[in-house]
Image (cartoon, rainbow, N blue to C red):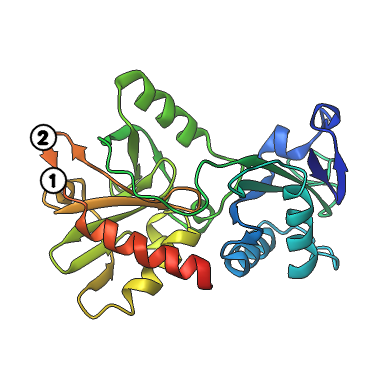
Amino acid sequence: MVNVNGTLVVTTEATISHANRGLNYGDAVFETIRVSAGKVLFWEDHYFRLMASMRILRMEIPMSFTPEYLEQQVLDTVATVEASNNAIRVKIVVWRDEGGTYTPDTNNVSFYISASVLENAFYTFNDDAYEVELFKDHFVTSGLLSTLKSNNRIINVLGSIYAKENGYANCLLLNEKKQVIEALNGNLFLVNGYKIKTPPLSDGCLNGILRKQIISILGQLPDYILEESAVSPFELQKADEIFITNTIIGIQPISKYRKKEYANKVAKELLQKLNVKARLG
C-alpha cells in the first residue's frame, strides 16, 4: 500500500492526475529513508532537509507537517509491508498542487509515501568489485538547486544507462567546471592517508544525509582530517580509497577507476561507526 496525503491506498489504485506538477515540470522534492526495526534512521535530518527543500522551492508547508505527524505517516506506511528482517526503504514525495504552467496557481502541496523491503536490517560492507567511470555527456550545474533531492534527475538516469551499457557499477558526475562532485546515487569521499576529502555543497553535490553523518563521525576521530574542497578528475587516480555514501547502502567502496585499484580499510572502519550511530541516534 501507499500513503496518499495521509490515507493508505492499495498500490494498484493509487493514481495521479495528468496535470500533476511533479510529472509535468519536475515540481517536486523527495526523501529516501531507511527504516530498521521500526526506527526511522536519521529522521530529524531527513525532516529538516525536506522542509528546507520545500522552502527553497517556495512551497507552502502545511501546519500539519510536524516531525511527529510525518514520522507517524512513515511508520503507518511501513506497517503495511511484510519484512522478516524489519528493514524497509521509504520514499516521501512532495509536489506542488496542480494548476498553472510554469507559473503555478497555488503553492499548496500534496504528498505520497511508498515502502519496499530491504535485504539487511543495518548497513553491511560490500567488498565486491565496484568499477566506476566519469559520465561526461552532461554536467550538473553548481549551486543551491543541485543540492536538493528534486524530481529533476535526468542526468542521473542517463548516467545510469551509460553505466549499464558499458559494464560499470556506477558513474561519477561532473559540474560545469569539470569538477567531480558525486556518484549517480550518492556523495563521494576520497582518502589519501589520514586526509579525507569530499566536494563542497557549493560545487553542486547533493546535501546528503549520510554525507552529513560521515562528516560528523570524522570530526570525532583524531586520526583523520576532513577537507571539503573541489575535486579534480586527476585526483581520482591518486587516492588510496574512494567511497560513496547514501541513506540506503550506507558506504560503498569503489574498487577500480580506469587503471587504478583502491583499498577499503577506512570505508570499513567508518561503516562500523555509522552502524553504531544509526542504532543509538
Count of labels in the image: 2
Image spot of residue 127 (x, y percent)? 27, 43
First along the sequence among labels 1 and 2: 1
Residue wearing tag 2: 259
Identified at 63% across, 62% down, the residue is 39
Question: Looking at this view, is 34 or 216 the one in front?
Answer: 34
Q: Position of residue 207 (x, y in %)?
A: 48, 59
Residue 43 in view in this figure: yes
Q: According to the image, label 1 marks what residue?
A: 237
Viewer-nearest residue: 111 or 204: 111
Q: Relative to residue 281, is residue 125 depicted above or below?
A: above
Q: Position of residue 114 (x, y in %)?
A: 71, 42
Quadrant that contains the N terminus: top right
Element type at mark 1:
loop
Q: CA distance from mark 1 to mark 2?
A: 8 Å
Residue 127 to residue 146: above or below? above
Say which mark, if any, is on residue 267.
none
Q: Around disc 1, counting alpha carbons within 10 Å, would you say few (fewer than 14), some (14 to 19), or many (20 or more)? A: some
Callout 2: 10 Å neighbours few (<14), some, many (20+)?
Answer: few
Judge whether residue 95 can be spotted in this image: no
Left or right of residue 149: residue 217: left
Reply above or below: 229 against 132.
Answer: below
Outermost residue to the front: 84
Marks 1 & 2, CB-CB < 8 Å contact: yes
Q: Residue at x 49, y 31 (%)?
A: 157
Mark 1 belongs to which amino acid? Gln
